[in-house]
């Protein structure tokens, strides 16, 4: 179990996106990421503005927005400056290197131009990292590999997860860690692969489509993860209920940070 502080880890990290995330977590005393999965740009930006003060990171699925224009990106970047948070586009790339390089740099969304962090399925093998790093590394971006998923019956387990960890270890200039459900024990003192964990909720255990939730305490203290990713637990009641969203964001920030303090004092 890691008892190193986020601030110590920020100083030692060699990837600039990982450093930015660790510094932001330490500065804001927040290991909370909010996942904003809504279809309207107005709702999306309003939620980001409300949760912004409480989070280290905002996770996007930019392709969900039905009224996307490049202005949304400018507005998101302005909110990222205003509230001091990192942007993670949860794109889950999964194709050959040449194709993912194009999907990452081009198309309508031009993800590499604005997302500090994105992620990929390890299923194609190391060539997916080569493709994405050809675009992202010169821009100072970071990549997370999907080593595990929060869903019931996930196939990302056992030897597949182990192979994802090996792929990350071999590419630590660009791969900054994982989406996973637990910390992966490092091979040596210098290795610092972050773990960002979705499937976090305080009030319910899952949804009707296979999602499974654990509490911030289970995720950060018991499983040693670094960042809790919360979506509907924060904005799920109604995207327009601003006061409730603010209160939930604060509640999850406090729960995530308390679990971290307990972990580093262990
Ligand atoms: N997400 C998961 N589980 C995973 C991965 C991604 O839930 O294993 I990889 C995404 C899906 C959604 C967010 O964007 O994280 C969780 O949202 P809710 O907290 O609303 O379930």
Image: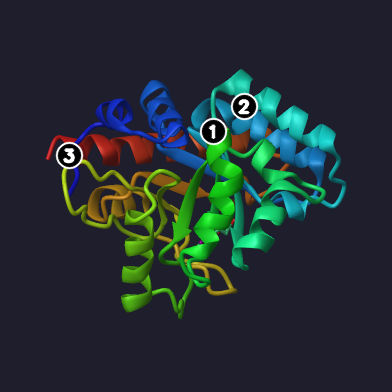
**Which residue in the protein does label 2 denote?**
80
**Looking at the rendered structure, which numbered label has been put on residue 3?**
3
Q: Residue at x 44, y 55 (%)?
A: 200
Task: Give the number of marks.
Answer: 3
Left or right? Give the position of 234 relative to 194.
right
**Looking at the rendered structure, which numbered label has been put on residue 232?**
none
> Is 141 placed above or below 207 here?
above
Please identify the residue farthest to the left as the structure is shown: 266
Q: Earlier in the sequence, mark 3 or mark 2?
A: 3
Q: Given contact means CB atoms under 8 Å apart, are the residues at marks 1 and 2 in contact? A: yes
Q: Picture coordinates of residue 216 (x, y %)?
A: 36, 49
Q: Picture coordinates of residue 67 (x, y %)?
A: 87, 47
**Which residue in the protein does label 1 denote?**
86
Rounded to the nearest angstrom, the CA distance separating label 3 from label 2 is 29 Å
Which element is circle 3 on? loop
Q: Residue at x 57, y 43 (%)?
A: 136
Q: Given contact means CB atoms under 8 Å apart, are the residues at marks 1 and 3 in contact? A: no
Nearer-the-camera pick, 197 or 240: 197
> Is 76 placed above or below 222 here?
above
Left or right? Give the position of 30 relative to 102.
left
Judge the density around disc 3: few (<14), some (14-19), many (≥20) Cα neighbours within 10 Å: few
Would residue 264 be visible to someone looking at this image?
yes
Nearer-the-camera pick, 255 or 165: 165
Judge the density around disc 1: few (<14), some (14-19), many (≥20) Cα neighbours within 10 Å: many
Q: Quadrant of the C terminus?
A: top left
Q: Picture coordinates of residue 179 (x, y %)?
A: 44, 56
């Amino acid at each position: 179990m890691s008892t190193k502080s986020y601030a110590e880890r920020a100083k030692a990290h060699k990837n600039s996106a990982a450093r930015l995330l660790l510094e932001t977590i330490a500065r804001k005393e927040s290991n909370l990421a909010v996942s904003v999965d809504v279809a309207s740009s107005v709702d999306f930006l309003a939620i980001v503005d409300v949760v912004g003060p409480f989070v280290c990171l905002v996770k996007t699925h930019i392709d969900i927005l039905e009224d996307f224009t490049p202005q949304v990106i400018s507005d998101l970047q302005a909110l990222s400056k205003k509230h001091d948070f990192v942007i993670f586009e949860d794109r889950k790339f999964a194709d050959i290197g040449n194709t993912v390089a194009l999907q990452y740099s081009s198309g309508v969304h031009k993800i590499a131009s604005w997302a500090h962090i994105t992620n990929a399925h390890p299923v194609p093998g190391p060539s997916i990292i080569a493709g994405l790093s050809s675009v992202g590394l010169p821009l100072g971006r970071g990549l997370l590999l999907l080593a595990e998923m929060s869903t019931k019956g996930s196939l990302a387990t056992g030897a597949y997860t182990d192979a994802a960890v090996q792929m990350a270890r071999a590419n630590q200039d660009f791969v900054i860690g994982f989406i996973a459900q637990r910390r992966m024990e490092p091979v040596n003192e210098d290795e610092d692969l972050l773990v960002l964990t979705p499937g976090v909720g305080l009030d319910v255990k899952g949804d009707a489509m296979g999602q499974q939730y654990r509490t911030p305490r289970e995720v950060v203290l018991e499983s040693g993860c670094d960042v809790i990713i919360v979506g509907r637990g924060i904005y799920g009641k109604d995207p327009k209920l601003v006061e409730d969203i603010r209160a939930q964001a604060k509640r999850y920030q406090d729960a995530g940070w308390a679990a971290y303090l307990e972990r580093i004092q262990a």
